[in-house]
Image: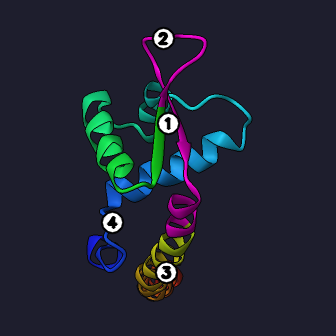
Amino acid sequence: MNSGLSKLGLTHVQFVLLAGIIWLSEGQETVTQAKLAAHAKTDIMMTSKVIRALEQRGLVKREIDSKDTRAKSLTITQEGHDLTVAASQIVDRIDNDFFSTLNEHLTDLNLHLLKILDSSR
């Protein structure tokens, strides 16, 4: 996964967090670093460091949350959105390649299991 995403200058974790911001934003709620970390099941400190790096690249904006000044609200920039869309196509292709191979082997396994079941009757 990382080798495919590296062509866009992203790691898998960066992609997951960018996609998470987009996903949570669609719910019309304020996306905070804490909500994003919970959604992505990532450590809050690691999430903060990754978001800081994405902010420095101009992919994400962090602002003090208007409802809780201790929290940082996150928005994705247009550049970040476009990059995430491009990255999701790479991720989909890699997933399809991986799971299609798995499905072929699974079909073979299922056929062998059916033969075993038939022979034991």
Rounded to the nearest whole Å, what is the CA distance between mark 4 and mark 3? Answer: 38 Å
Which is closer to the viewer, label 4 or label 3?
4
For disc 1, the marked residue is 39
Image location (x, y in percent) of residue 114: 52, 82
The amino acid type of the residue labelled 3 equals: Asn
Label 2 to label 4, Cα distance in Å?
30 Å
- The residue carrying pointer 2 sits among few (fewer than 14), some (14 to 19) or many (20 or more) residues within 10 Å by Cα, namely few
The tag earlier along the polypeptide, 4 or 3, is: 4
Cα distance, mark 1 to mark 4?
A: 19 Å
Q: Which mark is in front, 1 or 4?
A: 4
State the separation of the CA atoms marked 2 and 3.
56 Å
What kind of residue is marked 4? Leu
Nearer to us in this view, 57 or 6: 57
Q: Are marks 2 and 1 in contact (CB under 8 Å)?
A: no
Q: CA distance from mark 2 to mark 1?
A: 21 Å
Residue at (48% x, 42% y) in the render: 61
The residue under label 4 is 10
Q: Which numbered mark, 2 or 3, is in the foreground of this view?
A: 2
Q: Which residues are magenta?
A: 63-84
The residue at 44%/41% (across/down) is: 40
Closer to the N terminus: mark 3 or mark 1? 1
Question: Identity of the amino acid at label 1?
Answer: His
Query: Left or right: 26 with respect to 87?
Result: right
Give the mark nearest the N terminus, 2 or 4: 4
Q: Which mark is residue 69?
A: 2
| Circles 2 and 4: CB atoms closer than 8 Å | no
Rendering coords of residue 31 (x, y %):
57, 32
Q: Earlier in the sequence, mark 1 or mark 4?
A: 4
Query: What residue is disc 3 on?
Result: 110
